[in-house]
Amino acid sequence: MVAASEWNDFISERKALRLSVPRGMQRSHYFLSLPYRYSVPLMVCSGLLHWLISQSIFVIQTVAYTPNFDRNRNMDASSVGYSSIGIMLAMAFGVVPVFLLLIVGFAFKYDVKRVKYTGYKPSHTMPLVSTCSAAISANCHRPEQDKDCSRLPVIWGFVQEEAGGGRYTFTTTKEVGPGAPDR
């Protein structure tokens, strides 16, 4: 959802591309693959859930001694112990992130924003691509005269071609418009 939201923002504002090894005005990747406002709470929840599970099931080893304080190896035992309250807390806490994900997934609706520098509101949204590199590539063929498109902040929209017509693409030098008229 975060990747889709970042992808959709290219329709309303110029943003630099996010790469592992940035050049020019490109941005670096996220250290944890997500913005910190998502990754830090997820790490805390994951750590707490891991700790609760470790407190739920554990190994018990008893070492036996005689009344004279001599070891009695015949009476030593190993067993698996469990904590009912730990199991219930782990299950309850494990369900919370799932419900939060469902709530965010159903409540989140992407709204197309107005383009910052021109003020027009696109009547269309970005194409749905998820993380499919073929679909992303199809949207990323720059205009012929836009040589620095890979290093400068880009916006996605309809670009008029010099030879006539136009297409939807990422660009830096062109002003993007509302698109081709419906046929």
Image (spheres, helix red, strand yellow):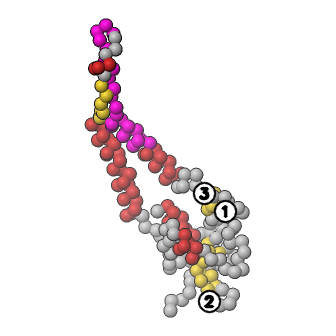
Among numbered discs 2 and 1, the one appearing first in the sequence:
1
Residue 51 falls left or right of residue 92: right
Name, please, the residue furthest toward the bottom.
183
For the residue labelled by badge 1, is the local secondary structure a helix, a strand or a loop?
loop
The residue lying at 39 percent from left, 57 percent from top is 101
Instruction: Give residue 50's position: percent from left, percent from top.
Output: 41, 41
Label 1: which residue? 26
Separation of disc 1 and disc 3 at Cα? Answer: 10 Å
Which residue is disc 2 drawn over?
165
Q: Say which element carries label 2.
A: loop
Q: Which mark is residue 149?
A: none
Q: Which residue is mark 3?
A: 29
In magenta, the rendered stretch is 47-69
Q: Name which quarter of the figure residue 21 lies in.
A: bottom right
In this rendering, position of residue 60 left or right of residue 29: left
Q: Residue 70, position in %: x, y?
A: 34, 11
- What amino acid is labelled 3 in the image? His
Rounded to the nearest angstrom, the CA distance separating label 2 from label 1 is 30 Å
- Identified at 70% across, 61% down, the residue is 23
Residue 39 falls inside the magenta stretch: no
Callout 1–callout 3 Cβ contact below 8 Å: no
Where residue 86 appears, x then y in whole percent?
32, 37
User: As rendered, which of 140 and 2 lies closer to the eye?
Assistant: 140
Q: Earlier in the sequence, mark 2 or mark 3?
A: 3
Tags 2 and 1 in contact by the CB under 8 Å rule? no
Please rate how many residues cluster around mark 2, counting C-alpha atoms within 10 Å: few if below 14, some from 14 to 19, many from 20. Answer: few
Q: Residue furthest top?
A: 68
Tell me if residue 167 comes above or below residue 153 in the rendering. below
Q: Residues within 10 Å of mark 3 (few under 14, many from 20)?
A: some
